[in-house]
Amino acid sequence: MTTTATTTINQLDDKAAAALLVSSYNKITAEMGKFIVGQQAVIEELLIAVLAGGHCLLEGVPGLAKTAMVSTLAKTLNMTFRRIQFTPDLMPSDITGTDIIQEDPETGRRTFVFQKGPIFSQMLLADEINRTPPKTQAALLEAMQERSVTVGGHTLKLDQPFFVLATQNPIEQEGTYPLPEAQRDRFLFLVKVGYPSRSEEKQIVERTTGTFTAVIDAVLSGQEILELQKVVRKVPVPEHVMDFVLDLVRNTRPNEADVAPFVKELVAWGAGPRACQNLVLAGKVRAVLKGRFHVTIDDIEAVAMPVLRHRVVPTFNAEAEGVTVDDIVARILKTVPRGEAKRAL
């Protein structure tokens, strides 16, 4: 799209703009499909996060095209893009930037000049983010929440839109550092990337060992994404759906009086208010993508796992018994009443 297309978005009514969002989504998935084989569910969740204005964390073992998926998405979006390979020796200044001494050729005087780091981009790929210690991981916190960076007492705003799309290896692997809870909470989604099917794996091998090449075309610009995000925020949420969101999140907290006994046994810490916000935003995007301009409980249930799985902390007993966070969230979803009002929509 172009600046003219952005102007058109502003002139459309809400439902027409929503239809344009769906059309853009379909074009992006088609472009990504030129290079990425399978992983449709992962691509959908990745795009929901972007359209909701949130950051996304992709987790999976090496070799599952996590990095390729993000870099391909970047090509479909006409935004500035930078990639950081996180390593154990990476320093915070390698991400945010640093002051360097520069000599004025006329006066000969030396002054400090701030050299921007790779975080000053609209889309940042934080590759293998859990391969670096927590001190360096924390360099992203302010940028992810405030969309700004403070260096040497000066606060610099980042260009909008700004997304951190991070990949991480399962924490059971050697040489990984678990992300701090505060940083995990900044990600709208934690998306699990699994192995491809047999037919998909065959296609991957054929493509990557032959002469296959794919030309990826840009579909949206950063300004157009900002306009579509405004459209998403206008999607109404019925009262019974909002109640379901609140009940769902509050039922992840073991200190609540009326939670199920298994929550008190298996959960050490539950999700905070940001989980409610993210459930609603992601639910709004999914509703639009499904052709509706209102959110249903089905939308919330569809995005509940990637929103909650990194915000629920299991107890030692749960880990000892082999109970995963996904197991816990799935059980909680079954305990929360859906409400009869949903049936009428």
Image (cartoon, grey):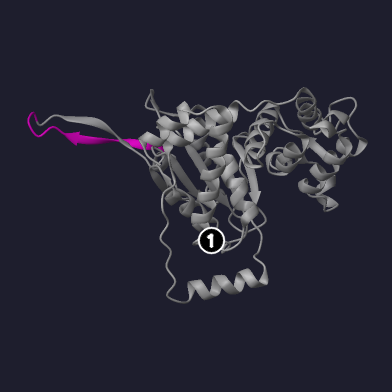
**For the magenta stretch, what is the residue range?**
96-107
Of 325 and 298, the residue lying toward us: 298
Q: Is residue 345 left or right of residue 218?
A: right
Q: Position of residue 192 (x, y in %)?
A: 66, 52
Q: Amino acid at mark 1?
A: Ile
Residue 5 x, y percent position in the rendering = 41, 36
Displayed quadrant of residue 285: top right
Element under label 1?
A: loop
Badge 1 density bin: few <14, some 14–19, many ≥20, Cα 10 Å: many
Q: Residue furthest right?
A: 261
Along the line of sight, the residue nearer the viewer: 10 or 157: 10
Residue 301's x, y, as percent?
Answer: 76, 40
Pinpoint residue 246: horizontal percent, then vertical percent.
Answer: 77, 26
Q: How many marks?
A: 1
Considering only vertical position in the picture, is 127 above or below 37?
above
Q: Which residue is mark 1?
A: 36
Answer whether residue 4 is visible to the viewer in this image: yes
Going 54% across and 52% down the picture, which residue do you hit?
Answer: 29
Q: Residue at x 77, y 35 (%)?
A: 297
